[in-house]
Image (cartoon, rainbow, N blue to C red):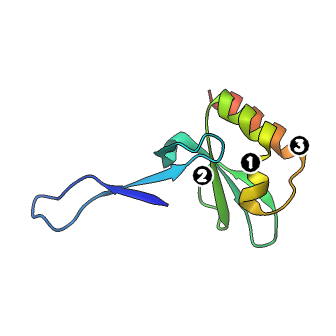
Amino acid sequence: MIVMSRGKSFKGTATKQIEMRRCVACRQVRHKSELLRVVKTAAGEISIDNATKIFGRGAYVCKSASCAANLKKRHGLDKSFKTKLPNELYEKICDEISDAV
């Protein structure tokens, strides 16, 4: 997790933090809202987390067609979740990203 601060507040003590995450496919750091979260729960279920509320191990992917294609080609989530994922999940991610754009 990469956290950047915006600067000091009026009194100089509190700072507002910007939550940044790294894309699994292109390795670029972006704001959390610009990425799609894929989560693996403790039960081993893997799903797309649009609300970013599901508890579990998360991996992030840019909402671009090139990142989706790169992720599918290289099976990038297999390394993040340390398990072999079916091609249907990658297809579902590609469909979700194409709907978002």
Circle 1: element type? helix
Which residue is at a point 64% across and 48% down the rendered structure image? 24
- Residue 93 vertical placement versus 65 (above, below): below
Is there a contact, CB below 8 Å, between mark 2 and mark 1? no
The residue singled out by tag 3 in the image is 88
Which residue is at a point 75% across and 52% down the rendered structure image? 77
- Which one is in front, 63 or 66? 66
Q: Quadrant of residue 53?
A: bottom right
Disc 2 residue type (three-letter): Ala
Q: Residues within 10 Å of mark 3 (few under 14, many from 20)?
A: few
Circle 3: element type? helix
What's the CA distance linking mark 2 and mark 1?
Answer: 22 Å
Disc 1 residue type (three-letter): Gly
Numbered badge on residue 76: 1
- Which one is in front, 72 or 52? 72
Specify whether 20 is left or right of 64.
left
Q: Residues within 10 Å of mark 1 (few under 14, many from 20)?
A: many
- Residue 41 vertical placement versus 60 (above, below): below
Which residue is at a point 59% across and 46% down the rendered structure image? 23
Instruction: Provide residue 12's location: percent of width, then percent of height.
Output: 12, 64
Is there a contact, CB below 8 Å, between mark 1 and mark 3? no
Q: Earlier in the sequence, mark 2 or mark 1?
A: 2
Which label sits in the foreground, 1 or 3? 1
- Residue 41 vertical placement versus 87 (above, below): below
The residue singled out by tag 2 in the image is 51
- Which one is in front, 74 or 72? 74
Instruction: Provide residue 62's location: percent of width, then percent of height.
Output: 60, 39
Disc 3 residue type (three-letter): Glu
Which residue is at a point 61% across and 40% down the rendered structure image? 26
Q: Earlier in the sequence, mark 1 or mark 3?
A: 1
Specify whether 11 is left or right of 7.
left
View extreme (bottom): residue: 42
